Amino acid sequence: AQKVTQAQTEISVVEKEDVTLDCVYETRDTTYYLFWYKQPPSGELVFLIRRNSFDEQNEISGRYSWNFQKSTSSFNFTITASQVVDSAVYFCALSEGATDSWGKFQFGAGTQVVVTP
Amino acid sequence: DSGVTQTPKHLITATGQRVTLRCSPRSGDLSVYWYQQSLDQGLQFLIQYYNGEERAKGNILERFSAQQFPDLHSELNLSSLELGDSALYFCASSSRDRNRNYGYTFGSGTRLTVV
């Protein structure tokens, strides 16, 4: 069963528009970790944010913000005032907290963000 | 530089061949993870080593194997290669303390093309 769902395959926006990426996860663990990664065309995985299941405080960092809702098992990510350099594939990932599961990332299918000038 | 080094960056080989991908973890990290990113399967976990021992297995084919050496670098061996093995292979390393604080770092990947 898929544990991380990114329902949006591709989002296209014009520069300066806001972009919100959805992520829904599934886990039975009470301790787990959620991540967002960016993969630009060059291919590397760029770490954006990590959230622990015991920390529901949302955060804004520059043009990025996150909305973690345990009640709905969602961990959404927003880019404010998008720029062309934000064009990339964005992955949501889950790492469960049990000793034998920790560190094994389960990735969503990714959302392609295309920002046009 | 993320601190995790993967070599080679690109590899082109023929079907039926065998290749070895190498990963040097970030200094001090004991765990190494291998992931495969293919067009049809997405990003998926293959295998984990911790301080030289296999810790967890994911969707790793029997034609694939890995090991972690005493100096903590790891190698992923892919044999009897098929066209479908063409993918980007990532290595990651991690460390974790008792306070649940940890670092997790991906390398830049090895792009394997099987022709």
Image (tube, rainbow, N blue to C red):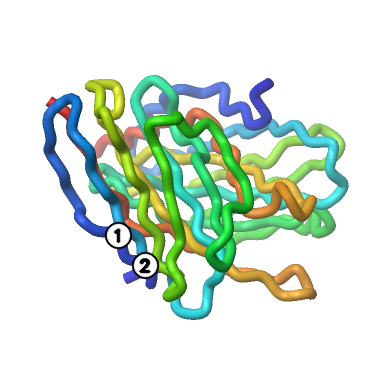
Farthest bottom residue in view:
B28
Circle on res. A10: none
Residue where numbered disc 1 is placed: B6
x and y, in percent, of residue B96 in the image = 67, 70
**Chain containing the residue with disc 1:** B
Q: Residue at x 63, y 34 (%)?
A: A23
Residue where numbered disc 2 is placed: B24
Q: Quadrant of the N terminus of chain B?
A: bottom left
Task: Bin the neighbour count of mark 1 within 10 Å (Cα to Cα): few under 14, some 14-19, many 20 and up.
Answer: many
Nearest to the observer: residue A13 or residue B15:
B15
Nearest to the observer: residue B36 or residue A68:
B36
**Label 2 amino acid?**
Ser
Answer with the quarter of the image where residue A77 lies: top right
**Label 1 amino acid?**
Gln
Nearest to the observer: residue A37 or residue B53:
B53
Q: Quadrant of the C terminus of chain B?
A: top left
Disc 2/disc 1 C-alpha distance (Å): 6 Å
Q: Secondary structure at mark 2?
A: strand
